Amino acid sequence: MLTVRALSVHRGGRALLDGVGFTARCGAVTGLIGPNGVGKSTLLRAVAGLPPQDATVRGGSLLFDGRPLPTMARERARLVGFLPQGHAVHWPLTVRRTVELGRLPHLGPLGRLRPEDHTAVERVMAATGIDGLSQRPVTGLSGGERARVMLARVLAGEAPLLLADEPAASLDPGHQLRLMEVLRAEAVERDRAVLVVLHDLSLAARCCDHLVLLKPGGGCAAGPTPAVLDPALLREAYGIPFAVTEAAGVPLVIPTLPPKSDRGVSRHAC
């Protein structure tokens, strides 16, 4: 499992993260939630060994199975797969060639794909439903198709720790659920630790085994999903009340607004 202990990241005189600690276990999906600006992306980038520009890790430790994460880029890439925000691509590579790039940490000096590399590429393309797009240029794909291609590229590396920063952003509900199903299958069936940033709390409630709620001002609340999705904890972090309920057997986390007299705008503004 990934163990984060008292992690602090600073930029200039400002703390981007301060004293964050939690674990993310193999075989489970751990959701990283919290309001904008609390350091969710910063945390993922620190684990990946790619802290934001001009930011430094001031304290704490990052362990995987009790050992410090390697500092060498190639070694870290074999252990940690990182899917950053957005799905921008600038070169008209084919879908298959793009996914093959995910095997780079495992290739020898000549960079030739071996049979096991082709097997890994074919598996993740089938898992993400892009095998039918194999020879199309990535630059000509829709946003949803491109998101699946970039996910497949990360999965092709077969790293035991997978980090995904808002992978469901800008996707329609169907694509969101299918993407989360792929991440869950990677966690459960291939015993990987998945740490994923989500803003949709209902999606987090439905798809995550554990949650880490980053709080403004530092620190976090971490634990099983139902325990972290406590209305009092959510209100403390986000500054607004929440209703946590269920419909048709599916958990729902609904942000609400205080009465009109408390906020000075129409109750029907949204």
Image (cartoon, helix red, strand yellow):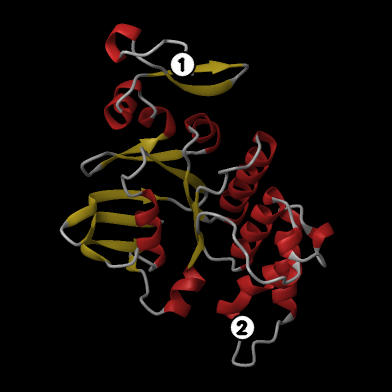
Indicate which disc, 1 or 2, sits on the residue closer to the N terminus: 2
**Do residues under tags 1 and 2 come within 8 Å of each other at their CB atoms?**
no
Quarter of the image for residue 60 reads bottom left
Given residues 32 and 142, the one toward you in this image is: 142
The reply to whether residue 65 is visible in this rendering is no
Which residue shows up at 47% across the image and 11% down it?
A: 268
Q: How many marks?
A: 2
* Residue under pointer 1: 269
Quick check: 115 above or below 250?
Answer: below
Indicate left or right for 222 with 209 as reference.
Answer: left
Quarter of the image for residue 141 reads bottom right
Indicate left or right for 145 with 240 as reference.
Answer: right
Which residue shows up at 21% across the image and 42% down it?
A: 217
The amino acid type, in three-letter code, at marker 2 is Leu
Q: Position of residue 39 (x, y in %)?
A: 33, 49
The amino acid type, in three-letter code, at marker 1 is Ala
Which residue shows up at 55% across the image and 54% down it?
A: 86
The reply to whether residue 14 is visible in this rendering is yes
Quick check: 122 above or below 195?
Answer: below
Which quarter of the image is occupied by the N terminus? bottom left
Q: Residues within 10 Å of mark 1 (few under 14, many from 20)?
A: few
* Residue under pointer 2: 107
User: Which secondary structure, mark 1?
Assistant: loop
Q: Position of residue 173 (x, y in %)?
A: 65, 34
Given residues 12 and 2, the one toward you in this image is: 12
Q: Position of residue 262 (x, y in %)?
A: 28, 11
Label at residue 57 = none
Indicate left or right for 241 with 182 as reference.
Answer: left
Given residues 110 and 138, the one toward you in this image is: 138
